[in-house]
Amino acid sequence: MTRPSTVPHASHGDKATDPSTPGPGVTRRRGRRPRRGRRAVLAAFLAPSLVLFLLLVVAPIVVASYASLYKWNGFGLPENHVGLDNYTRAFRDPTFRGDLWRGLVLIVLSLAIQLPAALGLAMLLNQPLRGRGVYRLVFFAPYVLSEVTTAVLFTLVFSPNRGLGEAISRWLGADAGAIFADPDTVLVAVFLVVSWKYFGLYMMLFLAARQGIPKELSEAATTDGASSWQAFRHVTLPLLGPTIRISVFLSVIGTIQLFDMVWVLTGGGPIHSSETMAVTMYQYGFRRFEVGYASAISIVMFVLSLVFALFYQRVVMRRDTEGAITTQGVQR
Amino acid sequence: MTGTANPALRARRLVLHLVCIAVGALIVVPVWFGVLGGFKDNGQLSTNPLGWPDPWVTGNYTGILASGVFWRQLGNSLLIAVASTVVVVGAAAMASFVFARFAFRGRELLFTLFAVGLMFPFAVAILPLFVLLRGLGLLDNPLGVILPQAAFGLPVTIIILRQFFRTIPGEVEEAAILDGCTPFGFFWRILLPMARPALATVSVLAVVTSWNNFMLPLVVFTDQSWWTLPVGVQAFQGQYADDTARVLAYVVLSMLPALGFYAVAERQLIGGLAGSVKG
């Protein structure tokens, strides 16, 4: 791996068609064309992306890190420099500390329940099963619904007075509507709705990866006397490794920035018990106009994502970037 | 082969089907509840949440479809999705062309900068973005949503397109250059047409992302006439909190375009997601 990429997606498949030596066409052109002309072409082609990206992605993050050092209501220029006070305040704030804890809980639930379930279903749909195309279509469909739509739908499904909630309550013998109102259950309820929307995505990724594994491999294992579980455990699963590791990555990064779903389902309540970092940031930034403090929270989110990504890239996904045999063939 | 299998295999298949049907029910029942609920009144919803409406009440759906607010939001979502997609795919295609087919110093560094952008949480930038857009006078202006969305869509689009552009053989470019093609001519008349499948894939991803975006339009548009569907759905729920049936109708109507799009573009969407993960 030559480039210090921090992102898993940017990694493999370069070996065969490495473009840094992009064939005779480019070299010849370089010889023929004056250097300045070539540079102008490069600049013209890169300019739109660079301007957009620097102005609207990079600059805001720089500004946020600057604003996080001020007590600032977002109007005028920040003047009241407070050093790292916003950060120390965040780490003392029980709500923010709770956000970190709840984020961790959501991540653990996703990794322990959502991803394995998705993997299981993907293996299931890989069997020759009549109608599996329909199943796949249905399982993945929630992914295209917005988090907002999903959240409103589930608010109504579980609405205590009317709706399915009542029926479910009668059926369960417990009050279904209360799961979003009870601080002890609300986080799990949010997790379930998040899973409803996203498990299909992971299932689909696993399925695509599974179909990229040559049949001969697991067939060879079974011919050699392995049970189908052994074939899965020792042949298929390791070959799915790269996709599993990327799914873990996506799931963690997605959970760190979870906002829409929580905001619409619960607003972070009751009494902060389903609040996430992004919700806290939004509350302070857009409701109470404590922009400095809210910026500090954004920066913590950013640093957490970055540190996780760097760590994960270096330690966990390292072998993937060195070229796993599963990466070919799935793509088109 | 399917019909005559031995009993153990058939039992196994049956179990698989049952599992799939159970999971499918978890997905379909809430949506089904919404679709039918829109045809009920609130009394029916309490007494008969899952059964067929009796009588069928069409007022919830027709009222929304006749009101204009829904259509306005649909139009806004559409405008913003299309414009964001055009901007992001256009800009990213040009950059990917350079990243894929030119060698120059700092290329990998620059590419890494974009790639790292893949994990900049939108929420991190939203506050300063808001301040910036306010300063530029882009609040309550669709560009205030279109341009940031395009900017945040660049990383994934560039990664997928660069990958694809690299697969086009150097001979093609060489021949074009020999025939007198300028770099722009090659890009526009040869590379882009050849890359149509990849362009379709990234466009579908961009449309879905824009369509579902909530946080940015939420903070950028205080003027209701610019609201997109997600913002509108949330506001509608707040406004008619007691009228569950009507909100259900609104939710269902707002789902239809996304589901319709999914039905049409399923292949590109799935291919794109799998492809972006493979990278």
Image (tube, rainbow, N blue to C red):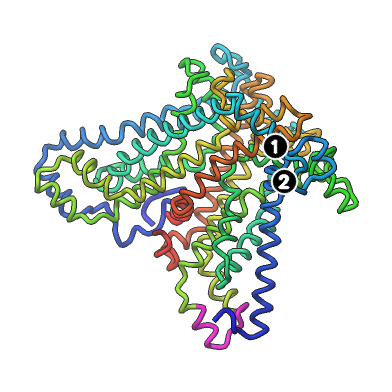
Asked if labels 1 and 2 touch by Cβ distance under 8 angstroms, the answer is yes
Could you say where residue B139 lies in the image, as x and y percent from the top left?
A: 52, 18
| Pick the front one: A267 or A49 | A267
Q: From which residue to which does the magenta span run? A: A218-230
Query: What is the three-letter code of the residue carrying label 1?
Result: Leu
Indicate left or right for A309 with B157 as reference: right
Q: Earlier in the sequence, mark 2 or mark 1?
A: 2
Residue found 29% across the figure and 56% down from its top = B167
Q: Residue furthest right?
A: A173
According to the picture, the residue beneath numbered tag 1 turns out to be B248
Indicate left or right for B190 with B120 as reference: left
Q: Quadrant of the N terminus of chain B?
A: bottom right
Could you say where residue B54 lies in the image, as x and y percent from the top left?
A: 78, 42
Depicted B244 relative to depicted A319: above or below: above
According to the picture, the residue beneath numbered tag 2 turns out to be B33
On the same chain, marks 2 and 1? The answer is yes
The subunit carrying tag 2 is B
Task: Categorize mark 2 by other alpha carbons within 10 Å: few (<14), some (14-19), many (20+).
Answer: many
The subunit carrying tag 1 is B
Task: Categorize mark 1 by other alpha carbons within 10 Å: few (<14), some (14-19), many (20+).
Answer: many
Residue found 57% across the figure and 59% down from its top = A136
Depicted A274 relative to depicted A210: above or below: above
Indicate left or right for A95 with B154 as reference: right
Could you say where residue B271 lies in the image, as x and y percent from the top left?
A: 45, 54
Instruction: Report, in whole angstroms, how far the alpha carbon at label 2 lies from the one at label 1.
Output: 9 Å
Depicted A29 relative to depicted B224: above or below: below
